[in-house]
Each structure stands twice: as C-alpha cells, then as structure tokens.
Amino acid sequence: MAEASTKTPFWRMERVSKHYGGVIALDGVDFQCERGEIHAVLGENGAGKSTLIKIMAGVVQPTSGQMFLEGQPVTFPTPVAATDHGIVCIFQELSLMPDLSVADNICITSPPGRWGFIDHKAQKRRAEELLARVGCADVHPGELVKNLPLSRRQMVEIAKALGREPKLLILDEATSALTSADVEEVYKILARLREQNLSILYISHRMHEIEQLADNCSVFRNGRHVETFDKGTRTDDEIVQLMIGREYSQVYPPKPKHAVAPQPRLEVKNLSWEDSLHDVSLTVGKGEIVGIGGLDGQGQRELLLALFGVLRGTSGSIAIDGQPASIGSPGTAKSAKYRIALIPEDRKSEGLMLPMSVRDNISMASISSLTKGLVVDRAAEDQKIDEMVRKLSIKVGDLNDAVATLSGGNQQKVVIAKWLMTDANTILLNDPTRGIDVGTKQEIYQLLRDLADAGAAILYYTTDYDELIGCCDRVYILYDGRIIRELDGDDITEHNIVASSLNLPLEQREERAGQ
Amino acid sequence: MGMLRAVDKSVIIAWGFVVLLLATASIVLQTGSFFSSQYLLQQLQIATFLGIVASGAMVVILLGHIDLSIPWIVTVGGMMSTAAAGWWDPALAVPFGLLAGLAFGVLNGVGVAFLRIPSMIFTLGVNTVAQGLMVLHTGGFAPQDHATDLMHFLAVGRTVGNIPNAVFVWVLVGLLIVFMLRYTPLGRYIYAIGNKEGATYLSGVDTRLVIIGCFAISGVCSALAGIMLAGHTTKAYQAMGDPFLLPAIAAVVLGGTNILGGRGTYAGTIAGVILITILQSILAVMQMPEAGRQVIFGVVIVVMLLVYGRGQRVQG
C-alpha cells in the first residue's frame, strides 16, 4: 500500500457504500486498480462483487463514497457515462442480439455513419479489425450471431467491448460458458490487452483461472473489501480463509441425532438436463433436511425445477417412497400421489400474484380440493387459511389486502403457507430466505425443522452457507451441474463448503480429531 | 379483492361518462327524450348483443389474452343456427349454433395454450377461417337463413311487462360469468393467470385447460349473440358480427378491466357496454353521416382508453 500512495492510481474508490433499503450490499469499500494489470475479484455469494461492478459500470448509484479516475473525481449517473469514461463491462449474460449480424452487434452503440445513414462498408471494416484484435479473424462480420457457437459469441462480445475503446475492462464470469480451449484463447487476448496498457477487472469462481491469469487479487466478504494481495503470495487455503468468516447472526434449532439412517422419501438417480445437470444422484430421507450448496448458477435451480416436473427432456429416474415416479408437471407433483411442494426462487414473479389478495394467494395451490360441487367452500377455505396464518404467524391486517402490501418476510410466509396447505410431505425450497429479515428467517428455520420432525423430507437450496451449516443434516455441493461432494454431520463446515464450491480439495483430514 | 377500490373507480367513471353523454346530447339537441324510459329500454335491448359478446371477451382479456375471432364467430352462430333449422329441425337451431361457437372457441384455446401461438395472431387466423367457411356455406347452395321462432322470441319477444327477453338472456349470461369468476376455482385461476401465468403454473394449476376454457366461453358467448342477432333481424347474413369487435373490447377495457389481464369486474363491463351503446346511439341521433360517425366513435374510444390506460399504469 505504501507504493500506491506515491503515485496516483488509475482507478480508485473511497468509502463507497450501497444500501438497498435496510440491506447493506457494499460497506465503505476502498478499492483501486492500475493500468496494465489484471485484477481478480473474489468473494462468496452476496459478498458485494456484483454491486461493485454495477457501480463502476453506472448501472446503480452508490449511496455514499467517491470514485476517482486518474485522480479526477467521477460520477456515473448512467451506463453511457461510464462507457464515455472508458469503463466497459462484459456481463455474465450475453448482451448480443441473436438476429443481427456480427458487425451490427459490434457497432450497435455507435455505428459509423454517413449523412445519417449507417455506412455498412465502414462498419464491416471496423468489425473485421476488432475481430482480428481478439483473434477471431475467421468470423465473418455478416454472419448472424445466432449461427455462431457460444464460445465465438463470447469473443464477439469482447470485440464489441473493445470497440468502445475501454481503458478499464470488467469481465464478470466471462469464461463460465466457455470450453477449456476457448478459455485459453480468452487468456491470450487478455494478456495482449494487458500489454496494451488496459486495466482489467476479472471476476471468476474458477480458482485455477485466477492463478493463471491474475496479477493481483482482491477478496470481498459481506460487502467489505477484505484484502488485496499479489498473485502467488497466498495459498488457496489462505484465500478460502479470507472469503469465509461471516459472523453467525442466526440461531438455529438443534439438529436431531438420527440413530439409524432415515427411510428415503425422495431418491434421484442420474438426473441430467441439457447442459445444466449431469448425472445428479441424491436421496432425501423422511425427517431430514438436506441442503444443496455451491456457488450461484451451478444447476441448483434446474435441479429443483426438474424434481417439480417443470423441465422437459430430463433423463434419469426419480422415486418417491421407493416407487418410481413420473412427474410431468407441477400439477402432478402436488397431486396426492407425490405430494411435492416447491417454494420458488423469486417470490415476486414465481411465488405470488402480487396484486391479488392474501387469501387468494394462500389458497391458490389447494383451492381445487376445497370445493363443494363447483363452488369454493369459503368456510372451509377461511378455516384452513386461518390455521396457516396462525401457524406461520403471518402479520396481515385483512386477508383481502393485496399481498403486495405485506413485507418481504410475510410475503415469503404466504408462499410457504400456500404449499403447507397442500399437505405436501416432500418440500423443495429455492433460497427462501433471500432478502428477508432475521426474525422471519429464524421462524422459517424452526418451521422447517418442525416439518422435518413431523416426517417431511426437505431439500433446501440456499446461497447462504451459514444456513447449510446451521439447518441441514446433510449437504450436497453442486459444481457445474454435478454433485461434486456430499458433506455429512461435522464435515459441514464453512471451509469445506467454500472449498467444495470452488472445486478445491477438502481441508487436511489429520486436522480433525478422531479420523 | 384488494384491487376492488381501483376497479370501483373505473366503474364510477364509466357510469359518469354515460350520464355526461346523455346530458350533453340533451342540451345540444334541446330535448329531454334521452332520459325517457322508452329510449333507455330501447338502448338496453340493443346493448344486449354487445353485452353478451363483451362477457366472453372479458373472460379472455382477464387472462391477458385477446379474442379477435369474435366477428365471424358471431356470424357462425347466426348462420349455423338458422342452417340447422333448415337441415334438421328448428329445435336444434340454438344448440347447434352454440356448439359451433364452442368448437371455434376450443380451437382458439388449443392454438393459444398448446401451440403457444400468440392469441392476437391465432384468433385472427381463426376469424379468417370462419369467414371462409361461412362464405363457402352460403355460396355452394342456398341454406336456410331465416331465424326460428325461438330465436325470435329470445331476441325481441317480451314476456315480463315491457322488458325484452333479450335483457333476461344477458342477465343470465352475466350471472353465470359472475358466479364463475367469484365462486369457482376456475375464476381464481383466471385472475391468477392474468397476473402471473408462471406463478400459477408453479402452483400446480393446469393453466392450459383454463386458457382453453376461457376461449370456449368466449366462443359460446359470441355464437349466442349471433343467434340472437339473427332472431332480431329475422335473418343470418354475412359479416353480421363485424360491428362487434372493437366495441366489445373497448367496453371491457372502459369498464376497468386491465387489457393486460388479471384485474377487472363484471360490473365494469356492464357499464362499459352501456357507455358504448349510448355513444353509438347519440351519434346516430345527431344524424351525422356514417363516415363522420365512425371517425368520432373511434377517436372517443381511443381517448378514453388513453385516460384509463394512464391511470392503470400508475396503479401498477
């Protein structure tokens, strides 16, 4: 840090914070990077990496703090402002228009023009030149983007970014869709760009990539910048240690000790789906809470959707209570035969109809069984809803109020109530505690444990590894659509979860007594 | 329902427009006859056709879809019922007309729900197919096109005092729709799909069946209106349904139903239907040439929809 103070850093952030309502995504972050270096950013889910990038790219505004480019204070009210200053971001999701040509895509923000018309010849020349710079001279500028393989599209994306003449290039998981041969290509390009004195910020979950590529690394944790260090000065183990260490703020209900292995309720064998799931085999027993961990987007969401009958074209087998099950739709999944429930990821778009009443939302999944003849039995419906509202202590003024008027925690309880009302005994949860208050979280942990004790089988995906440790009897870690590790009992530790999520070996066995 | 207050507001606005229109016309034309019971009853009778068509249109719009095959399904209803009377027996006229409407409705539903073709395109295609079939039907040979006694009775007969039977048919259709929307699971599912189809599907609801059901209801309503229209004019004829499409959709939306689905009440649709009917009647009374009438009608509807659309977007 001493040398940094002697010269003006290329990019510097001072005490930058970002609050979303009561949630602190970034907390007084100081961060800087230089030209001609590749700077890797590491951190667990929710560590603040994405918020950092979004602020740098002008997508969101910091709540407080200052940013300096070459010593000059800057603000980016819009993404265009950031691009004008030479800060260009390549996001994880491809931003290309599939039905436009490569040249059109590359020049989309500022096509070369003549008298107000696009000069197609100049555009083609420019595209060729940029493609050559990223080593893709073989891609024809007139080709439609949708006809290119994924790896080539990623290259076109980089070419497009270079067309904006960046001084600071941000890559957010840019290699996650690429094969290893393509990744090598990206490395070469990045190395070349470094020689051209660009500053490159590189976000990746792949440890070996960072080792190979980065000049230095910054680790983020809990919205704070923990440490920046040069490549090679820290071992993998030390890096993992830097990434973990969140304070335990939750109190979890005690886990029961199973004397004998519980009877399996849900057995999955070799479940595969497109490129997202590969030969996933797992079991969830009666009375068991089984966690699914791993970094975001490793197939966890697809796994739950596949078990709930949403995905078409899955292979492999599913058995419920020892009987082979064929689950073709959520309607089948919730039927009396299988009794499966899914608490979906995004309550606002998948769990609730926000403008509709609390009542209508709670009874949505079970209303067809609450009828007298054709008509909804309002008395029976109200009685069950009352029961659920009391059981989950949902704070609601009037059941006829729109569910949108409730707090996030209470909304989530409404989603859970909806599914408890169906008498499900296999419960799949997709990150149900995201964005809700601590009090409600604890109520949900207790509820899950109560349900398990009453015989339910619970499969619980969460991005918060505290919850995996505190709530789950067993944990499967997914990496790239595969289960790469199963952790049981005392093996469920922060270190093991983080290391497994990064596909690193577990901590040394001899450190643990009795093994 | 939580959105009751917002919807009530648009119902009130729609009724306000009705009174305002009548009052303005009375002042401009220097007459009090717009508020006479005879005039109003006459308008109510005319409104029944639009009211029945709009009932079906509303159910589909609540889903977030649209049914553009209304014009020719109305015609199918009229022509198939009169034809059935000629082919077989007058008693089969009404059931066969409704059955034909149901068949086209189910076809719409299958196209939207299973083939996943946007309703705007698919129902437009079905409309054209229906048109072609009806042209074929009247062109090849001379089918009966006269309405049966029952159709006549339903459309213009009077059994209770001075009130046309058609009004009771509309009341019956309205009660069935209100019952379905408010008291059955199907009604809940319709609002739910209009709000978030994905979330409804993830609640284990067979959304495809609900969509087919709604288009079927719309088909039956259109055919019923066609049957009664044939009874009213004593004949079924080509393009008899053409004047209904825009007014039906406009009536539903003016009544406060969100054109994107998920929100709306039948009370609003009634208000919208009366509003459109009165507007058309006043333009006719003012003895404006047909062309000018159409321009004003179209402009008024677009302006009103703009006012409504704005309010709803703010609420959303």
Image (tube, coloured by chain):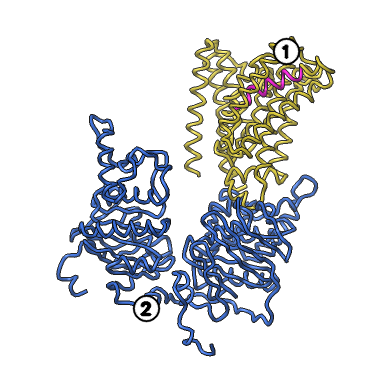
Res A284 quadrant in image: bottom right
Q: In this orientation, does residue B157 appear?
A: no
What's the magenta region? B68-82
Q: Position of residue A496 (x, y in %)?
A: 48, 76
Same-chain check, marks 1 and 2: no
Which shade is chain A? blue
Residue at which label 1 appears: B235
Dot label at residue A142: none
Disc 1 marks a residue whose amino acid type is: Lys
Q: Position of residue B165 (x, y in %)?
A: 77, 22
Task: State which chain is coloured yellow.
Answer: B
Q: Which residue occupies the foreground of this view, A336 or A178?
A: A178
Q: Chain of mark 1?
A: B
- Give above or below for A514 relative to A100: below
Residue at which label 2 appears: A238
Q: Chain of mark 2?
A: A
Q: Is residue B69 magenta?
A: yes
Disc 2 marks a residue whose amino acid type is: Glu
**Is B153 on the left or on the right of B249, as rendered?**
right
